[in-house]
Amino acid sequence: MSAEVIYGSELAQSMRDEMKEEVVKLREQGIVPGLTVILIGEDPASKSYVRGKQKASDYVGVDSDLMTLPESTTEEELLSLIKKLNEQETVHGILVQLPLPKHINEEKIIEAISPEKDVDGFHPINIGRMMTGKDTFFPCTPFGIIQMLKSKNIEIAGKHAVVIGRSNIVGKPVGQLLLNENATVTYCHSKTNNMKDYIASADILIVAVGIEHFINGDFIKEGAVVIDVGVNRTAEGTLTGDVNFDSAKEKASYITPVPKGVGPMTITMLLHNTIKSAKIAHGVYNG
Ligand SMILES: Nc1nc2c(c(=O)[nH]1)N[C@@H](CN(C=O)c1ccc(C(=O)N[C@@H](CCC(=O)O)C(=O)O)cc1)CN2
């Protein structure tokens, strides 16, 4: 078997084109979706991701503002900036790029963002809403993965989904969203015994560990759907995933590449959440 490759980059482009049309109509009604992205410090990967967010916002017509703050910014300064943005009517989405410098408490910052403007979907209130099956802002990478599966009409209900990794940004929420779609979900992590047995029984395998080529083709079940969330930079400076693409492609039914797989969907779902927030704020959101 040779898998069909799911290019998130293509789905992202078509979703962004649809959003662009929607934003034109919203602007005609005087609704201008506004996003503020806060970047602290000089991390090159974070700089590149926020550049991607700016570019994509410009493309779809979301009014985006990038606030670049020095590494020395204190937790109090950041909290007071978030407080101001929470009160600013033109701002529908607030995103603080992660990771933060060590002296800033990430949890405190996430909880300071108004849940109504939490377009990252990281606030405990939004996480709780997601866990209880309510409509909310879903975390962007997991939400993007669900869109990718649905775009290929991949059956989720009743399937065994195995999530490798338990981060708050990807692992935990993607498992929850798959459960909301009626999958049977198993989480694997660094303390899991016999991980290979779980991997071998996965109909849908989500790999988000940040270890280059952690998964090989021989580990996976024939016909499995393999979603690679890893973005690892090699010594040569290229990007590679958590899955050995060439070997896994021979056994999987569907597989995502790195780059051009899940990554572009993260930014796309951020724009989706920002537009949704603007519509909610103006009372024109219909679910
Ligand atoms: N506040 C947040 N911080 C972080 C998030 C997040 O969702 N919210 N996620 C990641 C980084 N991230 C977005 O912020 C992100 C990662 C990867 C990509 C992407 O498009 N990757 C491309 C390759 C890009 C490259 O060449 O470097 C791909 O996979 O094709 C976009 C966004 C951590 N922080």
Image: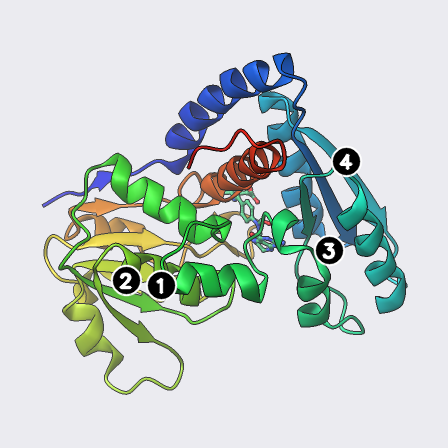
| Residue picked out by circle 3 | 43
Q: Counting residues from the N terminus, which is met first, the one under dot 1 or under dot 4?
A: 4
Residue where numbered disc 4 is placed: 65
Q: Name the amino acid type tagged 4.
A: Asp
Q: Regarding mark 4 in the picture, which secondary structure is present there?
A: strand
- Name the secondary structure under disc 1: helix
Which residue is nearer to you in this view: 80 or 28?
A: 28
Would you say the residues marked 1 and 3 are in contact, meaning their CB atoms lie under 8 Å apart? no
Task: Please give the name of the residue rendered at 32% of the width and 73% of the height, measured from the top-left corner.
Answer: 187
Residues 257 and 91: in front is: 91
Vertical arrangement, residue 97 with respect to residue 99, above or below? above
Instruction: Assess whether mark 1 and mark 2 are in contact (beta carbons under 8 angstroms).
Output: yes
Q: Name the residue under label 1.
A: 176
The mark closer to the camera, 2 or 4, is 2
Q: Earlier in the sequence, mark 4 or mark 3?
A: 3
SS label for mark 2: helix
Report which residue position mark 2 lands on: 179
